[in-house]
Amino acid sequence: MPKFTDLKVKLFTDGADKAQILEMAKQPWIAGFTTNPSLLKKAGVADYAAYARDLVAAVPDRHISFEVFSDDVPEMVAQARVIASWGRNVFVKLPVTNTRGEPLFEAVRSLSRDGVNINMTAIFASDQVARAVDALAGGAPACVSVFAGRLADFGIDYRPIMRDAVARARSTRNVEIIWASTREAFNVLEADEIGCHIITAPADILRKLPAIGSKTAAELSLDAVKAFRADAIAAGLTLESPPAPTPPSDRAARADCSPLNQIVFAGSAVLSR
């Protein structure tokens, strides 16, 4: 099993809580940050521009993705240009379509050629990957975010699309694939194994990574048993149960030592003479 220090995939933190972002930014192995409107809502962000500028000032040296939120394509493009002005390390997230299913491939092509760093997001299908990479290839630095974890939630094998996405991006000089909607630490190993450029994950998953490769399955098993025992004691659990039955070997030993067996043995000894 590989160790944490063996990983080549770049690690991004997915979240919008400022305190958490600043905490994760202290880790040199965190290469960037991704946010989205749902995460902003969860973090209680009200003034988007002020929040984003403050964050860029606090973390000026790493990738930070901020997403447009309009549903009108021309307005999305206008918002993208505003967001791009917040910092040189900012990547503008634009979804693959708006809510009416209107694609944004030509919009991101134009923005990318104008020097806007793009993170095209909400990608779930191979044809979306192909069109996104084609639109972004040759432009400014760009990312394509494939929602592997959400595909898995619905029983869809994400491995073929992830391999295809990585192969397509590696044929360009400027496009990288982000493994998105990460569900568990093992996804990081999967992303690393297929050569994915980046994986973005919640902080609670990323905090588990330094322990990768540090314990064997047997050690983990014993840890689990000890944890169950400690929790049972801490909870004060009790259970009335009958006395444990005597093991068969103990019963046989006591039977051999009974007075009757001793008499029978003595008689046998006399007859044998």
Image (tube, rainbow, N blue to C red):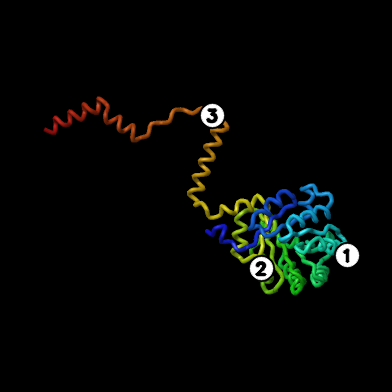
* Structural distance between the alpha carbons of marks 1 and 3: 67 Å
Is 264 left or right of 241, judged from the image as shown? left
In-front residue for pair 128/12: 12
Residue 147 percent across, percent down from the top left = 70, 59
Q: Residue at x 86, y 59 (%)?
A: 71
Residue labelled with disc 2: 166
Q: Earlier in the sequence, mark 1 or mark 3?
A: 1
Is 154 left or right of 85, judged from the image as shown? left
Q: Earlier in the sequence, mark 2 or mark 1?
A: 1
Residue labelled with disc 1: 74
In the displayed orientation, state which residue is furthest to the left: 273
In-front residue for pair 169/28: 28
Q: Say which amino acid is labelled 2.
A: Val
Is 108 left or right of 194, judged from the image as shown? right
**Residue 125 position by quadrant:** bottom right
Q: Residue at x 67, y 51 (%)?
A: 203
Label 2 crowd (10 A; few <14 / some 14-19 / many >=20): many
Q: Secondary structure at mark 3?
A: loop
Residue 226 percent across, percent down from the top left = 51, 40
* Structural distance between the alpha carbons of marks 2 and 1: 30 Å
Q: Secondary structure at mark 2?
A: helix
In-front residue for pair 62/65: 62
Residue 174 percent across, percent down from the top left = 71, 71
Residue labelled with disc 3: 238
Q: Where does the C terminus fall, quadrant-wise?
A: top left
Q: Residue at x 56, y 36 (%)?
A: 231
Label 3 crowd (10 A; few <14 / some 14-19 / many >=20): few
In-front residue for pair 63/145: 63
Label 1 crowd (10 A; few <14 / some 14-19 / many >=20): few
Q: Say which amino acid is labelled 3.
A: Thr
Q: Secondary structure at mark 1?
A: helix
Closer to the observer: label 1 or label 3? 1
